Image (cartoon, coloured by chain):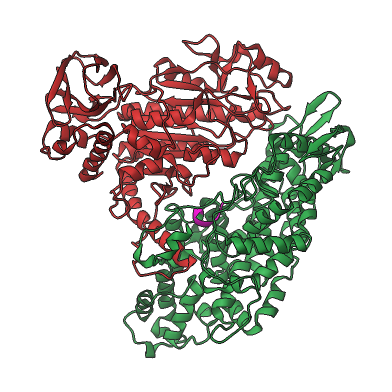
């Protein structure tokens, strides 16, 4: 990540808001000396990583997070032996109604540590029951009636990096494990991520000769861009791969997801700056033979994800990584014999140290159904994406909508903290950071997450105007995780939140709207 | 690609890759682009526009996998009409390598609890899958000049089935026979036959779609894909849905009752034919697309064809256009093709032949614009470069040896008989990625360096053996280095290289020597090594990925 890109990002988020709010510009900040704590803290940020796991085919949510006390569930599925017996369900603390499929048992430890969030009944209005159409909707972030070729995360990246591809970063923004890119990483103008499978050959850079004005000429330019990206990025990945050859835990074998996550863990441990990884697991289209097929899928999934988060902990990057599932739809409440047909809303699972563990939303309602007998949505999947961009990646609302997403989506408070500053203590990476305030924009009150202020440290949180004028200071006690502040007295606009302790700084931009 | 962006000289927009990746054109009105005014009227020579190597290569590349230099030169000599006649001639591939599966009933999973018995059965099933994939690759590689193998690939990517789901190679072979029977024929009949094809009944659960008395197990899987992917598509071009969710449910009821006939050989085997069993059929009234009756599978297919005629014709012609011309179809041309398709009462040959004969097909703007699929890249290289010693084609190694050719296609996302899902391979730009392209370049380099080896110890041998001299001697003037280089470049690349590219290629083959010293039979000139270097340099160009 180049320094000037960061300044550009800050400028673009800062300028966009004042124009609409009549707040004095960011000009002062733009001139701020580069050694100011504000500038330094921001320049060192952006090391947050997400791994998106696609469960392709439409995962049956009801046999994933199971409503084991709901008679309707058993009525709909018991006759075909498709219901999971209540005594087999893994119970979850904090719920007396919903539990895990028995094969998901390895995830229970993450749940107990509050590192697993279950967002219930996620879907979108006018659910499309075609795999392919619905996958496009999920991967792009579009509305059901809009045909969009570019994806939400790629559009966010394009907005953040207008200099790309004329200026290439040294490492790819995003990596998809596989032979081709999914829409999520395909932008309006460019591919914003790269597809990777094996890396034993690095192509030479392409030539820049003019091409013919034919369709073949258009395609040749496309191929050259792929060659160029391979040339630059493959090198970076190969180099990273050489640095860390071994995982810290043993991953299950015969498990493609586990092997993919193991490779990703090594790249992260090697210091790759890539912030988004996508990995695809197929086989969830269980029209028939669901009981056995889904059990195997769940078992592989749970073992892989549990191993990855253990590995992350041992490598020391657990605070800066989250994993999240998506699937194009859930499945029909009533079984069709040995399986289930296409459905609509289903849960999303999110894992990680900085995930605010627990249930979001209410238990699926199995009597008030839509269409051919499908669960109604409670959360739009784009609310989850907005939360990822806003809370995890620290994106301002102006770059979330109507840019990455077609319009405003209310965020769900899924993430507790963002690690923005890294320092070395006895060789162990630790994280000291201030998280994005929630809600943001703030109206009367807002809560600011604090992370990494450990025993023996003294820290101070400063709220300042964008030109560096201090408005308030708060002393942070070791172990303190939140500061609640009143924004009642503050005029609309952007503010800096800076957490400092000795040589460590971390900062965020907070927006106040009246 | 939006029409607008074509108005600017592309050479001035080095990164104007517009929509980075296409696809999904079949949901609603596809994305259209137009480069040439040339229409479907038959092409004929006029002035400078003659039947030459470029045109013959274009036709053969669209209709075959990896035409050789000799075949292209023969097509130049034969002329368009004779070449088209050859292309529309089917052939019967040899099945001597696959006697164990061709027309044979598969053995079903033994009920025995004995692990060794089950294991032996599993090994046999896997061996048959391996055998079928090898046979398919070999058949493509040994194909005469014919459209057959390209069309089988096309239709099996339309009416998809996955071997890993169907499990028995015997069924996939039977399905391939069905495709071969109908590939040039009547699309309506073809669709019905696919609907009751055993592999399809397994793949999309048709055999599990039934009602017996009060036991209702209507399964929507095939009904949905019949409309969404196999015939009319979700929407028409005006964005109007072609069917509702209720139509899916109603069609599923009508399609019920089909399963696979028990084998005459007893319960250990499964037959290769399907049967209709009235006891499993939902005999009630169904209303599909406004038509009510006690419909059966053939009625369901008939109703879709009669009620969605235009949508079906356009949907299929978009796919044909993308297969034979370019990823982004030309709207007017597709509409005209669709009309031809309807007027011909769904005759596949008529609509393809009209396109292949047309000025539109041969327009300069439409030549060389396709990304090579793994089959085209890898089997195409085996066939086009005349590579020898392909371990995959050695059937004595079935079930035991690494599949080097099939394995390469597999690692590029195209496992023969196993598309990623029921929609099949997306094709186009998805084939060229930061994942696939480096592997492709490396493979060509390794072949030219004779570095791909198979076997262990004393058994180890070079595979994918390339004979550079024999390759070069297929061109018109193997002793004229400049002419040979031009012709080899034209053969290896989608369109002729730019002057700057040609300079690099020619310097490579000159290799510090003088062109007048070149003699292909003079070993001292190292012609073999220099031709290999030339091909490696050509393979590094973006144009090598296109066809």
Coordinates of residue B217 in the picture (x, y in percent) = 77, 29
Query: In percent of the image, x 15 and y 21: which residue is there?
Result: A471
Residue B148: x, y in percent? 69, 65
**In the image, A156: left or right of B267?**
left
Q: Pick the residue in front: A264 or A355.
A: A355
- In magenta, the rendered stretch is B425-430
Residue plotted at (16% across, 25% down): A464
Q: Residue furthest bottom?
A: B516
Q: Look at 66% across and 14% down and name the residue there.
A: A72
User: In which image quadrant can residue B206 be found?
Assistant: top right
Residue A476 lies in the magenta stretch: no
Residue A329 at least partly seen = yes
Figure colour of chain B: green
Position of residue B453 relative to residue A327, above or below, is below
Q: Nearer the viewer, residue B262 or A353?
A: A353
Q: Which chain is red?
A: A
Magenta region includes residue B426:
yes
Residue furthest to the top in view is A96
Q: Quadrant of the C terminus of chain A?
A: top left
Whether A125 is drawn above or below A194: the answer is above
Quadrant containing the N terminus of chain A in the rendered view: top left
Q: Residue at x 54, y 67 (%)?
A: B381
Residue B288 x %, y %: 78, 39
On the picture, is A373 further left or further right than A298? right
Is residue A304 positioned above or below B70 on the image?
Answer: above
- Number of numbered callouts drawn: 0
Q: Position of residue B396 (x, y in %)?
A: 65, 58
């Amino acid at each position: 990540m180049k320094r000037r890109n960061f300044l550009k990002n800050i400028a673009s988020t800062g300028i966009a808001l004042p124009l609409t709010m009549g707040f004095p510009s960011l000009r002062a900040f733009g001139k701020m000396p580069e050694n100011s704590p504000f500038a330094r803290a921001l320049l060192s940020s952006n090391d947050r990583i997400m791994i998106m796991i696609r469960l392709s085919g439409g995962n049956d949510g009801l046999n994933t997070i199971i409503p084991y006390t709901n008679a309707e569930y058993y009525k709909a599925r018991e006759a075909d032996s498709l219901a999971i017996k209540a005594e087999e369900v893994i119970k979850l603390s904090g719920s007396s109604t919903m539990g895990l499929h028995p094969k998901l048992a390895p995830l229970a430890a993450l749940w107990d540590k509050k590192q697993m969030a279950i967002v219930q009944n996620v879907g979108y209005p006018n659910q499309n029951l075609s795999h392919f159409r619905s996958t496009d909707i999920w991967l792009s972030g579009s509305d059901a009636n809009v045909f969009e070729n570019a994806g939400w995360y790629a559009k966010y990246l394009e907005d953040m990096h207008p200099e790309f591809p004329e200026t290439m970063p040294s490492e790819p923004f995003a990596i998809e494990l596989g032979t081709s890119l999914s829409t999520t990483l395909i932008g309006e103008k460019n591919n914003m991520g790269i597809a990777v499978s094996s890396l034993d050959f690095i192509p030479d850079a392409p030539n820049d000769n003019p091409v013919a004005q034919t369709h073949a000429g258009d395609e040749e330019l496309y191929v050259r861009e792929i060659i160029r990206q391979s040339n630059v990025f493959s090198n970076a990945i190969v180099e990273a791969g050489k640095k860390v050859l071994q995982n810290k835990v043993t991953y299950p074998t015969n498990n493609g997801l586990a092997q993919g996550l193991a490779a990703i863990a090594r790249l992260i441990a090697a210091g790759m700056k890539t912030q988004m990884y996508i990995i695809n697991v197929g086989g969830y289209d269980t029209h028939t033979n669901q009981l056995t097929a889904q059990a195997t899928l769940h078992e592989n999934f749970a073992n892989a994800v549990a191993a990855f988060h253990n590995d992350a902990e041992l490598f020391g990057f657990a605070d800066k990584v989250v994993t999240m599932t998506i699937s194009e739809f859930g499945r029909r409440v009533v079984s069709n014999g040995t399986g289930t047909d296409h459905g609509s809303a289903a849960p999303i699972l999110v894992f990680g140290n900085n995930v605010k563990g627990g249930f979001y939303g209410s238990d699926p309602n199995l009597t008030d159904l839509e269409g051919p007998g499908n669960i109604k949505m409670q959360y739009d999947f784009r609310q989850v994406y907005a939360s990822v961009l806003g809370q995890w990646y620290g994106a301002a609302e102006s770059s979330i909508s109507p840019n990455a997403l077609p319009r405003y989506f209310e965020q769900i408070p899924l993430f507790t903290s963002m690690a923005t500053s890294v320092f070395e203590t006895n060789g162990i990476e630790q994280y000291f950071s201030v998280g994005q305030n929630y809600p943001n924009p703030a109206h009367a009150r807002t809560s600011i997450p604090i992370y990494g202020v450990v025993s023996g440290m003294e820290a101070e949180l400063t709220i300042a105007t964008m030109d560096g004028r201090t408005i308030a200071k708060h002393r942070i006690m070791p172990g303190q995780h939140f500061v609640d502040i009143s924004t009642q007295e503050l005029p609309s606009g952007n503010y800096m939140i800076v957490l400092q302790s000795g040589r460590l700084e971390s900062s965020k931009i907070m927006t106040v709207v009246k | 690609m939006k029409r607008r962006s074509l108005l600017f000289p592309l050479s001035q927009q080095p990164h104007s890759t517009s929509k980075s990746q296409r696809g999904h054109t079949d949901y609603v009105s596809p994305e259209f682009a137009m480069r040439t005014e040339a229409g479907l009227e038959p092409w004929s020579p006029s002035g400078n526009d003659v039947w030459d190597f470029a045109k013959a290569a274009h036709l053969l590349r669209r209709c075959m996998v990896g035409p050789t230099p000799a075949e292209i030169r023969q097509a130049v000599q034969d002329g368009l009409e004779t070449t088209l006649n050859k292309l529309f001639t089917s052939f019967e591939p040899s099945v001597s390598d696959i006697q164990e599966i061709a027309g044979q009933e598969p053995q079903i999973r033994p009920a025995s609890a004995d692990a060794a018995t089950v294991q032996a059965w599993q090994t046999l099933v896997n061996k048959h899958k391996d055998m079928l994939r090898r046979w398919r690759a070999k058949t493509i590689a040994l194909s005469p000049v014919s459209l057959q193998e390209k069309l089988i690939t096309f239709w099996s990517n339309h009416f998809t089935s996955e071997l890993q789901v169907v499990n028995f190679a015997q069924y996939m072979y039977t399905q391939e026979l069905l495709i071969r029977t109908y590939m040039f024929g009547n699309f309506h009949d073809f669709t019905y036959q696919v609907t009751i094809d055993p592999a399809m009944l397994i793949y999309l659960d048709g055999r599990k779609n039934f009602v017996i008395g009060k036991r209702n197990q209507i399964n929507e899987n095939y009904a949905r894909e019949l409309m969404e992917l196999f015939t009319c598509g979700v929407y028409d071009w005006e964005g109007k849905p072609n069917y509702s969710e209720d139509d899916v449910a109603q069609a599923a009821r009508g399609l019920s009752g089909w399963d696979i006939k028990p084998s005459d050989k007893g319960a250990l085997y499964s037959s290769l034919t399907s049967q209709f069993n009235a006891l499993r059929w939902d005999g009630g009234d169904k209303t599909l697309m406004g038509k009510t009756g006690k419909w059966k599978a053939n009625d369901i297919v008939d109703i879709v064809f009669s009620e969605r005629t235009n949508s079906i014709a356009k949907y299929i012609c978009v796919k044909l256009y993308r297969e034979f011309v370019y990823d982004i179809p030309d709207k007017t041309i597709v509409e005209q093709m669709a009309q031809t398709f309807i007027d011909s009462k769904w005759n596949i040959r008529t609509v393809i032949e009209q396109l292949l004969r047309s000025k539109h097909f041969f327009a300069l703007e439409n030549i060389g614009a396709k990304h090579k699929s793994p089959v085209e890249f890898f089997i195409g290289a085996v066939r086009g470069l005349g590579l020898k010693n392909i371990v995959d084609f050695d059937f004595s190694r079935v079930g035991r040896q690494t599949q080097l050719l099939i394995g390469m296609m597999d690692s590029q996302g195209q496992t023969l008989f196993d598309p990623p899902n029921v929609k099949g391979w997306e094709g186009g730009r998805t084939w060229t990625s930061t994942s696939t392209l480096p592997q492709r370049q490396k493979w060509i380099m390794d072949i030219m360096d004779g570095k791909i080896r198979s076997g262990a110890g004393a058994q180890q041998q070079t595979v994918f053996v390339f004979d550079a001299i024999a390759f070069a001697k297929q061109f018109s003037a193997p002793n004229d280095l400049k002419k040979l280089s031009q012709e080899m470049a034209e053969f290896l690349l989608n369109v002729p290289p730019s002057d700057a590219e040609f300079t690099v290629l020619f310097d490579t083959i000159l290799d510090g020597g003088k062109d007048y010293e070149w003699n292909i039979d003079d070993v001292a000139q190292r012609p073999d090594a220099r031709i290999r270097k030339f091909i490696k340099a050509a393979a590094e160009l973006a144009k090598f990925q296109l066809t």
